[in-house]
Image: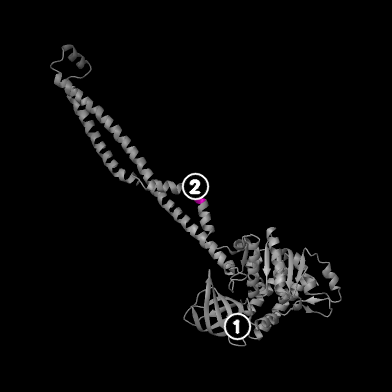
Amino acid sequence: MKLDDLLTQATSQLRDEREIAMNQGLDAPLDIPHASHLGKVGSLHLYSCEVLPGSKIIADVPMTLLPGNDMEATEGYLLGWVNGTLLIQTFDHVGKTLEHCTLIPDTSGFLEMGATRLSDMVTKPDSFTLGPAERLVPWLQPSPGADAGQARDNIPPAVLSMMWGDDRATRWTKLTTLIVDQVKKNKRILLVAPDHETVDALTGATAHALKMAALPHRSILCRYEMALTKPSATMPIHELGYEAQMYHFYAKANANKIALRKKYDRFRELTPILAYKRDKQKDLNEVKLLEWRLLTQLSDWQGKVKGIDKILRDYEALPIWKRMGMQFTGKNIETLAEYRVIYEGKIHGLMQEVEVAQARIKELIPEATIPKDLRPEYDELKEEIKRLGGTKKIREMLSAGEGTNRQAFAQNKRVMATTPGRILTDPLFRKVPYDLLIVDDAPRIPTPLLLAASGLIRERIILSGDTNDLVQGQDPSQTRWPHELLRTTLSSAAQPTAVG
């Protein structure tokens, strides 16, 4: 069987199970007698719900919660069982405690989204990396009559590796050692386990191994989306949750962005003020220059009037030859008086212009004066803006930080730990490729979910688990995974596990 055939078969299987889920009432509303708020991480909230016996719950299924306390409905996901209670993740806080609320799972929608994802892997192969996934086909669906053992032996271990063992501690020691080695090679790893409790424990073991290897586990490892358990392997895995890390990162980034926006807004506020002051200072300088020219002309005309007054005062004492010289130039007693009147008219006009100029100067001085503390503040802001690349660059930085980019944040993590149900339906995982896929308890993961996870892998797949979980086929050399998603998930949900 080829990969396309197996994907088509898995797609049909999910669509058939969707019909089964609808017929069995897996989308029917569930009455929740009591629910309690356990905590908040970023924008996500964790609730524990008391579910009536016999309720059929599938982990990672999207759901709608009707609080019944006059609050609006909220959406979220079913996470699984812990100590006999159902844990759900919601996007809104609907109260500390809830009495007689209603939970509406969307099991058929979950299966339809999964079928669409697998169908896209067949019809749009360029959007996925299916090379390593092809190596899974002999293990998941051995061909009838084929030598399965020989086919599996021909698979290069560099592409598909197995780590089976009955002791989980020993198996995980090998896995975490492999993860540390691959992280040092700068590989991006998708770490998968069948349920959230196992993912939490495996995340704690991986974080401990990274810490022992002197690697920054908080920046390398991420648990998608939020951890359910208390510290595992002495590691506070709640701090490694995707939502917690992203919330912390963007809270710090937003704090820096707020400070930058304040500086930018203040700079934009001061810029027109100082530009206005600069224009007024230019006008003031021009008016002062005009005043100086007017006063110079006024001084010249006043000097001429004083000269005429001196001549008129001393005219009788002047020698005859000076009087004749003055008359020759047209400056006799009669014309001097006329010149004086003309000069006084000029002086009067200039005095009026000087008064207008001085009045304008008085108006411009307060308008052009810059407060002494304003200029240093503006100069400091201008230097900071210049250092950051200018106003255009700052606008791009501020606009780029308006929304949280989940994809970019996920791509910065070297190891992402999650469940296959989230990989199957969350669009984030369709956009983020990985180098390695490490699957623990692989026999407990249904084929469609395992195929969806393998479509993101570029180099290598490592399967791990308990040998006793493998299902034997007709040929003793053949082993296979369970193919019925509802049967597998419902059987695991019927046995709630305690989280330590």
Kindly identify the residue that appears in the image at 86 percent across and 73 percent down. Answer: 147
Depth order, front residue of 73/225: 225
Q: Which residues are magenta?
A: 388-392
Q: Which residue is mark 1?
A: 84
Kindly identify the residue that appears in the image at 64 percent across and 66 percent down. Answer: 208
Q: Is residue 342 rendered to the left or right of residue 368?
A: left
Residue 309 quadrant:
top left
Residue 16 quadrant:
bottom right
Tell me the SS state at disc 1.
loop
Specify whether residue 430 is painted magenta.
no
Kindly identify the residue that appears in the image at 54 percent across and 83 percent down. Answer: 102
| Magenta span main SS | loop
Q: Which residue is mark 2?
A: 386
Specify whether residue 391 is painted magenta.
yes
* Residue 472 screen position, x and y as percent: 80, 79
Q: Is residue 127 visible?
A: no
Depth order, front residue of 120/330: 120
Q: Is residue 279 rendered to the left or right of residue 305?
A: right
Q: Is residue 307 visible?
A: yes
Quarter holding the N terminus is bottom right
Q: Which of marks 1 and 2 precedes in the sequence?
A: 1
